[in-house]
Image (cartoon, helix red, strand yellow):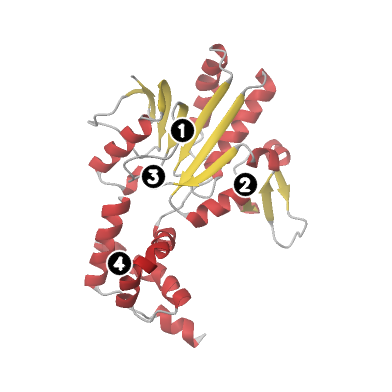
Amino acid sequence: MEKNLAFNNIELKQSEFDKLSNYIFTNYGIKMPPAKKVMLQSRLQKRLRHLNITNFKSYIDFVFSKEGEQEIIHMMDVVSTNKTDFFREPTHFEFMEEVILPEIYANKQSEMKIWSAGSSSGEEAYTITMVMEEYIQKHGHINYQILGADISTDMLKNAVNGVYKLEKIIPIPESLKKKYFLKSKDPQKKLVRVKPHLRTKVKFFRLNLMDTVYNAPKGFDLIFCRNTLIYFERDTQEKVINRLCDHLKPGGYFILGHSESITNMKVPLENIKPTIFRKTF
């Protein structure tokens, strides 16, 4: 206990914060203003404790050494924000059901490809899967694949496992809970798991949106990139959107979060509805 308290009291000096925040912004696009110094210190203290490193100078030296390459991944796991929910911003899923899917069926496509960029712990990707499954049951079979990408390896592990606290599925209609989730056999744990059929429909992989090239397929019909770009500077947002659009079909749909916008950006998207766009070429 005393050892843990000692690690919790390790201070991140201003010069050390500047070095880390500049690196995180330059390489991952995540803004770390001075107000986030305490947050960064608190989150990284866990990594110091895990590595048994007693000061941030030694930690930074390790992170930027050849031996510390793997630690950068762990550092970004604790730095990145991963707020998400099932059926978050539901109007997007309503639009998918009422407009996008009827178009796909009308065009008699045999396959549909969807990308959840910034997929966090998987709630968005699995929500998309439930929407697809419900539509298929009413209108007939179509092959589909969903890609989920995130920078956090911890979140990706959670997404692949598909295990959530019972309280996380509160927003989901009761009929869908019964269809698509399994309750833990131990009632004390209060956990649920996405059923195997849904889990097989989503492939998750690690991606830094700041990379100049994305190791992902082309020809997506629909890309969700919601509440991820808000952590980036405006010019970085534009570059990321353009890179994502390189993987989107002409006429494909691109969806942002409700607090995000492409106003005055040079991107190949036309506005259909608030935060819903279509690739123009």
Q: Which residue matches tag 3?
A: 228
What's under tag 1, amino acid-wise? Pro
Mark 1 lies on a secondary structure that is: loop
Label 2 or label 3, whichever comes before in sequence order: 2
Q: CA distance from mark 1 to mark 2?
A: 31 Å
- Mark in front: 2 vs 3: 3
Q: Residue at x 53, y 41 (%)?
A: 124
What's under tag 3, amino acid-wise? Thr
What's under tag 2, amino acid-wise? Ile
Q: Which residue matches tag 1?
A: 217
Q: CA distance from mark 2 to mark 3?
A: 22 Å
Mark 3 lies on a secondary structure that is: loop
Label 3 or label 1, whichever comes before in sequence order: 1
Q: Nearer the viewer, residue 25 or 110?
A: 110
**Can you give x and y, in whole percent of width and height, for residue 129 in the image?**
60, 35
- Mark in front: 1 vs 4: 1
- Mark in front: 3 vs 1: 1
Q: Which residue matches tag 2?
A: 169
Q: Which residue matches tag 4?
A: 37
Mark 2 lies on a secondary structure that is: helix
What's under tag 4, amino acid-wise? Lys
Tell whether 158 sits left or right of 239. Answer: right
Is any part of residue 30 visible from this angle?
Answer: no
